[in-house]
Amino acid sequence: MNVLVVGRGGREHSIIKKLTKSPQVDNLYAAPGNGGIREEAACVEIDEMDIQGLIEFAKTNSIDLTIVGPENPLNAGIANHFTEAGLTVFAPSKEAALLEGSKSFAKDFMEKHNIPTAAYATFTSVEKAKDYIEAKGAPIVIKADGLAAGKGVVVAFTKEQALEAVDQMMVNKAFAEAGDTIVIEEFLEGKEFSLMAFVHGNKVFPMVTARDHKRAFDNDQGPNTGGMGAFAPVADISKEHLDFAYSEILQKTADGLIEEGRSFTGILYAGLIMTKEGPKVIEFNTRFGDPETQVVLPLLKNDLVQVIKDVLQGEDPQLEWEKASCVGVVIASEGYPGTYKKGIKLPEWKHAPNFFAIHAGTKWDGETIVSDGGRVLLAGAKEVNQEAAQRTVYEMLDSLKVKEGFFYRKDIGM
């Protein structure tokens, strides 16, 4: 098969690493890819949002399967356009991707289909949003309605923080039009975890759980980011609560989307929190999570191509998982998630058993690979248990002496 992966981040590099192990793949392409991906797939200079260019490439190069990584092309309808062009794509339609593209739509959907989530209200008026905060008090959660690269959420522990978040999103346009509408939610207490599943229509095949670390600095300090590291599986979620999440969240979501004429195909990601009442949904994504994918896919025993083929045909892919743990630590550019420099030479990895490196914000500058984003690399390890995986990662990072221009958290997986 000829396979195309759309995207340029760590999630896409992880997908490509998995695809390189498939005996079914003859030619593997990435559009546009990154500095690390180019060592494992042919990178083509087509932007993720150039949907017509991607379709033309897929037709010209007899692409048998396209896998879409990032959320922006999904919400622009890339799956609809590929399907209309007679091309096989593993990704949700624009209508189904709205589950991630609009937080207000997602909240209304969950309320309608009795899917457990936080109480909420939606606002397009700054004054009404602030009146609501004054009435409800803090802690409280403020979310930009649209896509904001994982950064459009503020957990406010004081009313002042909440009111400032409203101004940042709606007045100062910190997330452009994504913040024209905001969702304000009750603050839920508990441990968060992520649950992804392969989905086609009403067929749902869950993966192992993962937990990511959103805050920029150790001990969960600093601003929210797209994720500073992750580990899988999560040991503190009981089978009873997992079964509940499968049936009352993932399956209900797939069934509800069919009911609304938005049948889902692709990866459904539920960001969950374990409350005293059980698991509740914090957010939905409609694609592989980042950085969760980087620690979940290494544990998958199956051939990813065969899994996707089975799912698209409505068959059970019989997912098998290694009895092991995976920990990944993100190396980010100094200043992230704010402003940062690009073009910095990367640390040089040493090869070590059970260790792997995933490229995210990197590019080839003609001579070497340099930084090209906020989250630059992920250092990962797969070991018999979480403690061993964590030790392997941090020993490697200590030996690298990650230089000026980069930083990483020292407590991922703790």
Image: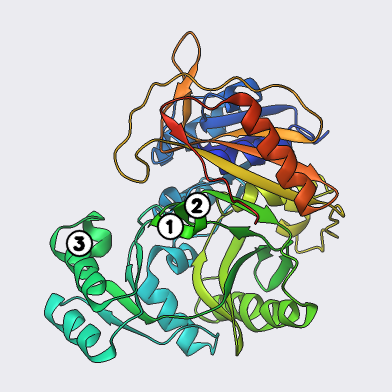
Label 3: which secondary element: helix
Would you say 155 lies left or right of 55 here? left
Could you tell me which quadrant the C terminus lies in?
bottom right
Asked if 200 appears above or below 409 in the picture, the reply is below
Q: Position of residue 166 (x, y in %)?
A: 21, 70
Q: Amino acid at mark 3?
A: Gln
Tell me if mark 3 has few (under 14), some (14-19) or many (20+) residues whose alpha carbon lies within 10 angstroms of its own: some
Res 95 → quadrant: bottom left
The answer to whether one can see residue 1 in this image is no
Could you tell me which quadrant the N terminus lies in?
top right
Are the residues flagged by discs 1 and 2 in contact, CB closer than 8 Å? yes
Tell me if mark 1 has few (under 14), some (14-19) or many (20+) residues whose alpha carbon lies within 10 angstroms of its own: few
Residue wearing tag 3? 168
Q: Amino acid at mark 2?
A: Asp
Labels in figure, total: 3
Q: Position of residue 361 (x, y in %)?
A: 47, 33
Q: How is the image coloured?
A: rainbow
Residue wearing tag 2? 218
Q: Position of residue 152 (x, y in %)?
A: 34, 60
Pick whichever of labels 1 and 3 is earlier in the sequence: 3
Residue wearing tag 1? 221
Q: CA distance from mark 2 to mark 3?
A: 25 Å
The answer to whether one can see residue 409 in this image is yes
Would you say 39 lies left or right of 297 here? left
Camera-side residue: 372 or 154?
154
Asked if 347 appears above or below 194 in the picture, the reply is above
Q: Position of residue 144 (x, y in %)?
A: 31, 66
Residue at 19% of width from left, 75% of height from top? 124
